[in-house]
Image: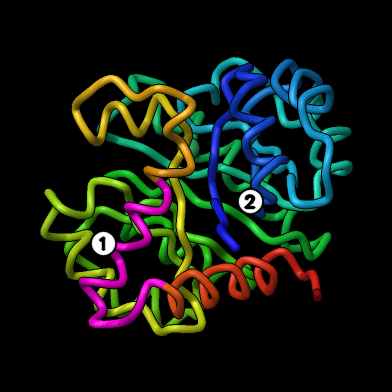
Amino acid sequence: MLSDAHCHLEGNEELALIQQSQQILTIINCDSPEEWEENQHLIRTEDQILSFGIHPWKASDYSFEEVIPYLRQARIIGEIGLDNVWTTVPMSRQRQLFDQQLAFAAANKKPVVLHTKGCEKEILSSIRAYPNKYLIHWYSSIDYQQEYIDEGCYFTIGIDLEDHPAVQKLVKAVPSNRLLLETDGVGAMEWALKRTVSVENYADLLRTHLQHIAKWRNSSEELIEKTTYQNLMAFIGQKK
Ligand SMILES: [Zn+2]
């Protein structure tokens, strides 16, 4: 059974339908109240779980107070985090909203999906301040990998695995019980693979990614498929 621990639907109903028909266990990210409402209409099975959090790129667009109702409804908080590479949103604003969402998640015992781009050191000290269950999404730094592993985090492996030495280091280092699969959605797959991706190829590309992970870990496709599925169930806090 396939799983996708971090995916953006970006309004794509066909993608939602593929996940449903193939029973792909998926955390579907909602980065705004608007996307939360939209995704409520697209999900149809228990295998599709919504996460909600204001992304660091949108930290200037919403106040913490106005998103509290959505944080309350979501089982998973994220993706939230900090980014000093791909956005011009002031770090002071990112930091404020990130801390508020982190504190909310820890107080309400909701697992968190983290975006750490360029701010790996800062986020490491943040999660030490707010003990919780964390999923580090598409970690792409060569640094602090062992420190995050030692904190008990789960990790998704970025779909640019074949081209990225830091991701290759990570895929070999993550303990078996904390390894997860992700696509980050079709837009991110196109970015990572540097080509156009058709939605109908989503499941095939997810499987190819799984095969690459198995190769880097000297493991079998079957074992990685089973392990990543079970790990995602454990992260979500679900038993089957
Ligand atoms: Zn994402």
Circle 1 crowding by C-alpha within 10 Å: few under 14, some 14–19, many from 20: some
- Whether 211 is among the magenta residues is yes
Instruction: Give the number of the disc on residue 43.
Output: none
Residue 11 against residue 174 in the figure, above or below: above
Rendered image quadrant of residue 192: top left
Rendered image quadrant of residue 191: top left
Residue 110 at least partly seen: yes
Quarter placement of the C terminus: bottom right
Instruction: Give the number of the disc on residue 212.
Output: 1
Which x, y percent locates residue 38?
Answer: 76, 18
Q: Is residue 63 left or right of residue 201?
A: right
Which x, y percent locates residue 110?
Answer: 76, 60
User: Mark 2 belongs to which amino acid?
Assistant: Ile
Residue at image mark 2 = 24
Which x, y percent locates residue 40?
Answer: 83, 27
| Range shown magenta | 206-221
